[in-house]
Image: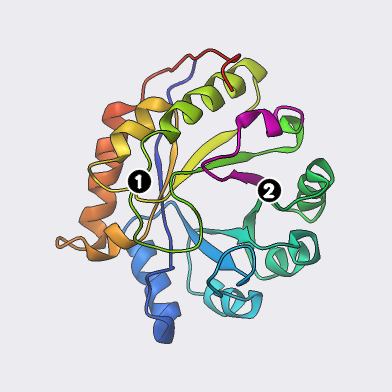
Amino acid sequence: MAPRVPLIVPSVLPADAARLGAEVEDLCAAGADRIQWDVMDGVFVPNLTFGPDVIAAARRHSSVGFEAHLMVVEPDALLARYVDAGCELVIVHAETATHLHRTLHRIRELGARSGVALNPHTPVSVIENVLDETDLVLAMTVNPGFGGQSYIPAVEAKVRRLRAMIDASGLPIEIEVDGGITDGTIAGAAAAGADVFISGSWLYAYPGGKADGVQLLRDRAAAALTPVTADLGRR
């Protein structure tokens, strides 16, 4: 198995909305591998956040890729808008995509990479038959909708099952974790099998600044990344 390299992906959810372009530039300068936009519709999750026009306006300020995490009840109607806005990766929730295989395929047709997110209670078995259309699986380590929540350690068992499933498939699918990722929790997620790590509230509050925070997260994850096996039957 090739060694896995951790990717640190800041979320702009805690950013100053009045200066998003500058916030994006700061995150790029801090060493972000890409930037995540948490898109919330006020229905699937309580909050209402970034529309495609806002993301498109910020795109020219970024030297790294954008990913859109669509926490919305009707993702299919929005896919093209977020790809056109400059999101190279679009993530939909398995809980909201009625025809998940079709939705993931459509994201790729639009020229973006496809991702599927799983809430903490959602079993990995729901994506077993769509791996061929998937570039990334996001295991939520909090319940979606708010920043600053506490990490749910029990999701690490799910990450282990995902890692085993993906390794067995032979497909180059990333495993991302999002929610409560800090210098104290990232090692557990990495050891379980994740290789992409979203950090928002912790990174923005880190007293050493964003660049040192990104590096600390990268170092903690890299130290913990090891090949992981798990029982595929436990789902």
**Front residue of this view, candidates 175 and 158:** 158
Residue found 71% across the figure and 31% down from its top: 131
State which region is magenta.
Answer: 113-129
Q: Which of the image's four quarters has the C terminus?
A: top right
**Residue marked by disc 1:** 151
Residue found 52% across the figure and 76% down from its top: 58
Residue found 49% across the figure and 41% down from its top: 176
Q: CA distance from mark 2 to mark 1?
A: 20 Å
Residue found 44% across the figure and 44% down from its top: 141
Q: Quadrant of residue 4?
A: top left
| Residue occupying the far left of the picture | 207
User: x, y (%) of residue 40?
Assistant: 58, 68
User: x, y (%) of residue 81?
Assistant: 74, 70
Q: Which mark is residue 95?
A: 2
Query: Residue 157 colored magenta?
Result: no
Q: Quadrant of residue 80?
A: bottom right
